[in-house]
Image (cartoon, helix red, strand yellow):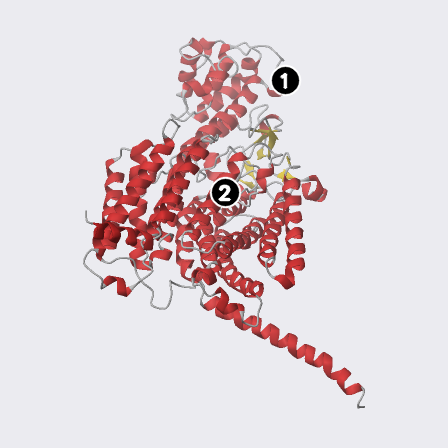
Amino acid sequence: MTAASAPAASRPAAARRGAGSAVLGSGRLLRLELRHNAMLWLLPVAFALFWYNGYREIMALPPMWNLRAMTLQNRLLFDLMVPAVGAAAWMGSREGRRSITDLVAGTARPRWSRQLATWAATTAWAELACLICVAVVYLITARHASWGGPLWWPVVVSAAGVPALTAIGFAAGAWFPGRFVTPLVTVVVFFGLAFGTQATSGDHSYWQISPLTAGAFDIGAAPGVATFYPYLPDLSIAQVMFTAGLTVAILGALGIPVARMRWLAAVITAAGLAAAGTAVALAGTGRLDPHGMIAIPALHDAAAGQPVRYTPACGRSPIPICVHPAYAGFLPAVTTAVGSELTEFAGLPGAPARISQVAPVYQQETGNGINVSAHVSGASEFIVPDPLPGQPGGTRTQFAANLAEGLGLQLASYVILGGADQSAGAAPSQAKLAVIAGSVRFPSSVESRDLAPLYGQVLPEPGSPASLAAKRFAALSPAARHAWLAGHLAALRAGRVSLAQLP
Amino acid sequence: MTAVAVRLVRLHATSRRLPAALALLAACAAGLRGTLYGHWDDYGALQLPLIFEAACAAIIAVTAGSPFGEPERATGRWLPYLRLGTAVALTGLASGALAAAGAGMPLAGGFADIVRNVAGLTGIGLLCATVLGGPLAWTGPLAYLVIGVYGLYTDWHPPALSTPWIWPARPPHDVGGALCAAVVFAAGLAAITLRGAREHPGGDGPG
């Protein structure tokens, strides 16, 4: 080693030592902040709120990944909001609250650096709470779900929303330290987040950028969404971009008062605002795709529109019913609800060899209206009615009634009226209507007004002679009805059977 | 009332930041009035007043904290009465201000709902002040806000939460809900009167 080379070699080493000690110092500061953080004390509150508000409702849902993951996104941030924003505001106001701003101004680290360490510690605890809640829900769902795997985009959106919440709270506390700031900023954020979605209207709304919005606003977590087709991450990507941009902008703005770093902080703030603004603009270009998810053209991957491959789960009824494996838990309920119809029509001319579930088709209407339909060809296809038992507003009785009105009536009318062979426009005979009405077992919860649009089309008017004949026919067992139809279906379709000739 | 008593009340009010609290309560009332002009769906219309009621309760609870701590307790026998009077007066003012803000507007629940919710939420806040200290007393009312909002949500999405302890989800004139809110308010008043807000020897709480 020469005298000239010695200093040149030691300079990088010194720089490395300096960088190393800075990292060590930052780590030590972060550890201190983690140990003395208000969020740590508010973790029980966060878990209690999530258990009360989110967990119980999520677990009451059918064990389908799409339902639970999308509901989780809608609830998790909402439940973490009060403790996370409150703790962050509390930590952000610490120096001002304790009147130690001047005291710590003389320390080695700039104020921005100290604030980022405090914010990071608060966010780390809040993020831990978020991930624990996700882990609990996903582990339990993994044990119960009959098909599929975890949806990660809703988790990513929730996890990305936590730093934004803490950044808002922290900045408010840092800028306006005082005893009233913490509750006020918490209430304001609560109001903004909880009521922000109220302004959402249609699939082009900018407001769907809210991280609480999982999918189309008026569909939300529906069993038919992300089951037959993959979960579209378009809206999630925009939401993550928005929350990340917001976080960066707020954290950058904290550094603007620091004289030495003003330009750097301003650039960071501008970059964050640009990202958040772009995300909002992208959300405004969304459209509802036929599979019930929001597609954003600039973020859309056309390959994501391919249907999911699956092996259907089929029952052992006389006419087998096959459903998507995610619905396997509802197969017994479906076959029970239309069991008598399946027994009655199995093997008759025109009856399907099996009935398969198809995907619902979603279409945006004016405002927040969504039309849900299905491309059903004949009696061999059907859609499982929504809501399922366990979903909000869904009961087993209602599910059975919807099946009778949908699948049961569809099967009976197709077989009795001759399906594709029936003459277009011709009104069905009273005998046909009587047989259809006598074949379908409507639960007692189905009221006359629910069926009113069908009178004269596929069902007889209440109190009419055909209605009385239908009651007579319904009194027979499914096997007896099957035997009668086997011998008389051709004549019935040809219009050669009168009401008096019905058994 | 003597000049000394007036001065004592004024000093107590100043030490608890009552002028700021009154301004914020007025701001909450103005905020409620402003939002009532907006168009909200059924959820929003019912949940909206609860947010402002919780904000008022949190403000009242935060004022319970004393900046003096132990020395103040040794100054005389009037302190419990001052604490009681402050809490009762602020609760009454908050209820009145919110009710006035909703006058002539489609305020869900009406005056009875406001009085019940503000009293119950304030009771929770005062109990929190006794246990956690004044600066952290907001945690109770705001955590209960989430519970109340969810309770109102279940009115549309059964099974509805029928326990009277979640009184915001009960009808305005429900006796069970009113009794529970009254019990919590009374417990909060008793706790703050007799014990005052908790003081943290090493500062104002965690963090």
Residue drawn at (29%, 38%) of the image: B115
Residues at discs 1 and 2 in contact (Cβ within 8 Å): no
**On the image, numbered disc 2 is attached to which residue?**
A192
**Position above or below: A317 against A136:** above
Which chain's residue wears label 2?
A: A
In the figure, B156 relative to A159: above or below? above
Viewer-side residue, B89 vs A299:
B89
Q: Quadrant of the C terminus of chain B?
A: bottom left
| Any part of residue A237 in sight | yes
Residue at point 34%, 34% (across, down): B99
Q: Dot 1 falls on which chain?
A: A
Seen from the viewer's position, the closer of residues A422 and A167 is A167
The amino acid type found where label 2 is placed reads Gly
User: Which one is nearer the viewer's eye here, B102 or A167?
Assistant: B102
In the image, B26: left or right of A11?
Answer: left
**Percent coordinates x, y for residue A397 in the rendering:** 40, 32
